[in-house]
Image (tube, grey):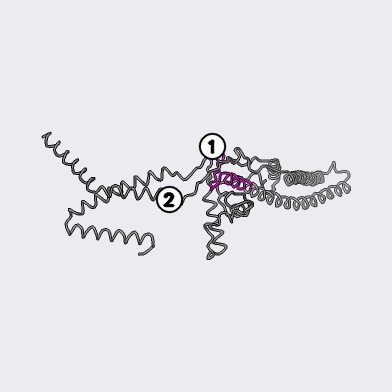
Amino acid sequence: MSNLKEENNSIYLTDIIFLIVKDLKIIIRVPFFFLLTAIIYVSFFTTTLYTSDAKIMSSKSTGNASTFSGLANQFGLSLPSSSNEVLWVYSEILKSRTLADAVLKRNFDTKKYGKKIPLSQILSGKVADNKLNNSKKSFLLNEQLRSMMRVSEDRNTSIFTLQVESFEPVFSADLLTAIIEELSFHQQKYNNERIKKTRIFLEGRISNVEVQLMNAEENLKLFRERNRRIENSPSLLLEQQRIEREALVLTSVYTTLKQQFETLKIEEVKESDYVLIIDSPSIPPFKSGPKKKFIVVLAFIIGLITSAVIIYYKNISSNLSKEDMTMINKIKKVFVKNIYAVFFLRS
């Protein structure tokens, strides 16, 4: 029994060796074709890429304005919140069209294109088709810029890691620096607009409260002039307490609003670090892609697998009947038809 198994194993091994020798041309030519194609591709059709990275976080501490806003709320006032209280979602802002448009207008120095060249011109090589209108070109440039960026966030520390990949190391670092600057400008512009709206609101409220306070103080003065002896009149004492209380409340509100207004005036003139840079953009010393050796080895492995499939199909098809071959051809046609329908949206 064991001799029979050994004989079957030897026959099976002999058959494999025979198939390899018989179809040696396929085994050599197919992997060589894939290998040569991969070498040509990585040598002439790929661009060496360099990745610059940086770490940032948002300055989202609450300032004195939030304290005064809380005091104002105790008196029934609803003041716009301080701009520093905004929680910035950098992952969304960095992928926004507004930020991309601002970065595309900036000039950069590159060895390939020269000095002081707008980023839109540097990236426009792939979208230089004159048939495209400006809106389509702008959309493609935005998409291309977004594809060069990667953003990740550490949920525990709220630290964002930014990466930019381009064809030159210094250009990658400069581009990432410009993106961080535009992010800070975007946040600063938004905060300034919020502060301006709050200031306008406070100016109106201060003016109104000031008029009400003056009226309340005038009413209190007139009451005291007209009623100099009110010790024996409970109704007059109650009226005096009501007028004094109204004046006191308006005085507190007026004081709070003035403090809030002075705080906003300070916020308008001071320069804040809206984006805190933990690690500045680095100039990458080594290339990050493409992985040429990996592509070549992968292509060679795919070539070997393809040659094995071709040999297997070739030997199997020679032993099949006409009915089986007819069925296989039908399956191939149906498969190709369905694939065509999927990719070209045919029913």
Is mark 1 in CB contact (under 8 Å) with mark 2?
no
| Quadrant of the image occupied by residue 16 | top left
Q: Which label belongs to residue 16?
A: none
Of pointers 1 and 2, the one earlier in the residue sequence: 2
Q: Is residue 60 left or right of residue 336?
A: right
Residue 65: percent from left, percent from top: 70, 43
Quadrant assignment for the N terminus: top left
Residue placed under numbered mark 1 in the picture? 156
Cα–Cα span, label 1 and label 2: 42 Å
Q: Residues within 10 Å of mark 1 (few under 14, many from 20)?
A: few
Give above or below for 169 relative to 326: above
Residue ID at (54%, 64%): 130
In the image, which residues are magenta?
157-181
Give above or below for 271 relative to 321: above
Identify the secondary structure beneath mark 1.
Answer: loop
Residue 256: percent from left, percent from top: 75, 44
| Callout count | 2
Residue 8: percent from left, percent from top: 15, 39
Residue type, label 1: Asn
Q: Nearer the viewer, mark 1 or mark 2?
A: 2
Q: Nearer the viewer, residue 332 or 166?
A: 166
Magenta stretch holds residue 308: no
Residue placed under numbered mark 2 in the picture? 41
Would residue 338 be seen by someone viewing this image from the given angle? yes
Would residue 245 be seen by someone viewing this image from the given angle? no
Residue ID at (62%, 50%): 108
Residue 229: percent from left, percent from top: 88, 43
Q: Nearer the viewer, residue 232 or 31?
A: 31
Q: Nearer the viewer, residue 250 or 140?
A: 140
